[in-house]
Amino acid sequence: YMDILSIRCGLTTSLRASASRPLSLFARVPPLFTEELGLPYLNAFLDSIGSNFSHGANFATAGSTVRPPNTTISQSGASPISLDVQLVQFSDFVTRSQLIRSRGGVFEHLLPRKEYFSQALYTFDIGQNDLTTGLKLNMTTDQIKAYIPDVLDQLSNAIRKVYKSGGRRFWIHNTGPIGCLPYVLDRWSVPASQIDKHGCAIPRNEIARYYNSELKRRVVALRKELSKASITYVDVYSIKLTLITQAKKLGFKDPLVACCGHGGKYNFNKLIKCGVKYMVKGKETVLAKSCKDVASRVNWDGVHFTETANRWIFQQINSGVFSDPSIPLKFACTR
């Protein structure tokens, strides 16, 4: 889902000293990005009380999609704050932050300068929830593939809008191997013949790979169309697949089993999710508890990765090895 994290990007190679540029992330990116840049964690755009937006604003919402959902969050779990809504929020933030900042005083210190928005790095990490939406509707692999072009049309248009607003640096993540997620394996099971040697669902990963191949085509086209833009494509799919398929070698274990959950092959139950409590013999009891070896586990709750796994994933993203062009994150703002 698209989140906006406006983080100041340092001009030096270390990015640890004086920071002077913002980094705007339209993505579900962990706080590790800000840690790497030596910056405070970002306040949410909707968290209006006591927030400091001088170094950024986070527009992320759990469960958001590129395409506007046609269901309520209680029906499907999809956030009503989809990509188009986040773009409106970002536009409002750009305009209103300057109006309020002009009042001076404390506002001048809590809001970003106008030039930060044109100097920012805009990162997009969105689309996975659009793919699993099709699974929730019992669509076939081909039916989900059929609407992916529309998803990418809307994503491409969002990038164009940011470009039109002055954005020039873009950092775009592809989507991960959804066929290796415990909740996908549990909720939308496939025949044993469609499970690969690592335990992942082949047709589900086929959907993710198709999305990624089409996304990369769009990135190539956007580079030609948006001539003044610098666009980096990050292969998050390969990073996460490496972690899952080489978990033991990397010091992890049980990559397809949720650390925090309840029962079943994948320790995931959609009715008894991580942290759920029930009354048992008149006493409130946590049924879906955390595992004791969380530091060595890949998946946290069936959907999300653990902190340890996220740190490993971020190290690979930060190195630039999985990026096209191949550049470390710390140099993204200097291109």
Image (tube, rainbow, N blue to C red):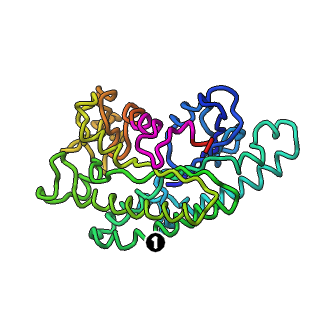
Work out whether residue 61 can be spotted.
no
User: Is residue 262 in the magenta section?
Assistant: no
Q: Which of 218 and 72 is in front in this view?
A: 218
| Coordinates of residue 95 in the picture (x, y in percent) | 76, 56
- The total of numbered circles placed on residues is 1
In the rendered image, the vertical position of residue 274 relative to residue 81, given as above or below: above
In the displayed structure image, the side of residue 185 where residue 38 appears, left or right:
right
Q: Amino acid type of disc 1?
A: Asp
* Residue under the point 32% across and 29% down: 294
In the displayed structure image, the side of residue 230 where residue 91 appears, left or right:
right
Displayed quadrant of residue 23:
top right
Work out whether residue 36 can be spotted.
yes
| Coordinates of residue 14 in the picture (x, y in percent) | 59, 28
Give the residues drawn in magenta, as a range: 313-331
In the rendered image, the vertical position of residue 86 relative to residue 102, given as above or below: below
Furthest-left residue in this view: 193
Neighbours of disc 1 within 10 Å: few (<14), some (14-19), many (20+): few
| Coordinates of residue 42 in the picture (x, y in percent) | 61, 38
In the displayed structure image, the side of residue 111 where residue 308 appears, left or right:
left
**Quadrant holding the C terminus:** top right
User: Is residue 330 in the magenta section?
Assistant: yes
**Which residue does the numbered mark 1 point to in the structure image?**
150
Judged from the image, the secondary structure of the residue bearing numbered disc 1 is helix
Q: Which of 67 and 224 is in front in this view?
A: 224
* Residue under the point 24% across and 42% down: 256
* Residue under the point 24% across and 52% down: 185
